[in-house]
Image (cartoon, rainbow, N blue to C red):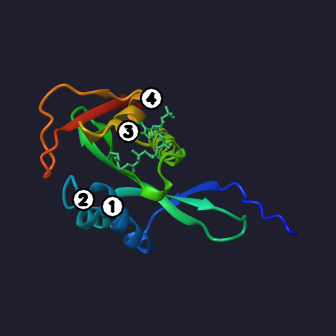
């Protein structure tokens, strides 16, 4: 009898673009709907020139197309004294791909993107927002050295406290 063996899947991270609108929207609805209208908002950020989107794809067989499983969105904005802040606007992994390291790889990649951008821009720090109830994401961010910023944290449309975190680049 022929033995069938599942090949280990590899992960590739590539730039996102207009062809990813449906994937971005679907995952945003699945994972962020409880926070607000991100199924509408994130596709507009994907198409925005100032937002750098990357998509993680699982490659089951080399040479074949990948399956999109997650994404990050990064923005950059100026602050006083001619410096910049990078903002991780979104990091999301499709529910059926969560818990097997994709989020960690995406975050590592986003940090590398910001470190690369520092060659062109004086970026002081990388910031993000996360709901206080989101234990998994807060744990992940903590392991990357993100710490809570002081001050007014505000609320998501869904009523959750929005914590602001940052790490030095
Ligand atoms: C948060 C998120 C991006 C993490 O991605 P992921 O692929 O599921 O996470 P990983 O498999 O890379 O694991 C990351 C860490 O979370 C931990 N983790 C996994 N499931 C967990 C759970 N239910 N509770 C707490 N921690 C958990 C893992 O153990 C891992 O930590 P470790 O490496 O120290 O063991 C993903 O779960 C997600 O998209 N969630 C919904 C959207 C979201 O919350 N985004 C972040 C806020 S903007």
First of labels 4, 3 by sequence position = 3
Residue at numbered disc 3: 136
Crowding at label 3, few (<14), some or many (≥20) Cα neighbours within 10 Å? few
Q: Is residue 12 above or below residue 21?
A: above
Alpha carbons under labels 4 and 2: distance apart: 26 Å
Q: Are marks 4 and 3 in contact (CB under 8 Å)?
A: no
Cβ atoms at labels 1 and 2 below 8 Å apart: yes
Q: Residues within 10 Å of mark 4 (few under 14, many from 20)?
A: few
Which numbered disc, 4 or 3, marks the residue closer to the eye?
3
Residue 30 numbered tag: 1
Task: Please give the residue where the numbered disc 4 appears in the rendered image.
Answer: 143
Q: Secondary structure at mark 3?
A: helix
Q: Is residue 37 left or right of residue 122?
A: left
Q: Farthest residue in the right direction?
A: 1
In three-dimensional space, the C-alpha distance between marks 1 and 3, rounded to whole angstroms, equals 16 Å
Q: Nearer the viewer, mark 4 or mark 2?
A: 2
């Amino acid at each position: 009898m022929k033995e069938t063996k599942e090949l280990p899947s590899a992960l590739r991270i590539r730039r996102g673009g207009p062809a990813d609108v449906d994937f971005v929207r679907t995952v945003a609805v699945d994972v962020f709907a409880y926070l607000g209208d991100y199924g509408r908002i994130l596709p507009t950020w994907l198409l925005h020139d100032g937002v750098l989107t990357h998509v993680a794809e699982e490659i089951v067989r080399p040479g074949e197309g990948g399956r999109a499983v997650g994404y990050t969105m990064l923005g950059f904005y100026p602050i006083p004294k001619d410096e910049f802040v990078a903002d991780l606007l979104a990091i999301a992994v499709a529910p059926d791909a969560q818990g097997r390291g994709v989020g960690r790889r995406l975050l590592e990649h986003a940090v590398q993107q910001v470190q690369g951008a520092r060659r062109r821009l004086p970026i002081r720090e990388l910031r993000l927002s996360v709901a206080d109830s989101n234990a998994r994401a807060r744990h992940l961010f903590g392991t990357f050295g993100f710490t809570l910023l002081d001050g007014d944290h505000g609320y998501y449309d869904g009523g959750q406290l929005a914590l602001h975190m940052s790490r030095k680049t």
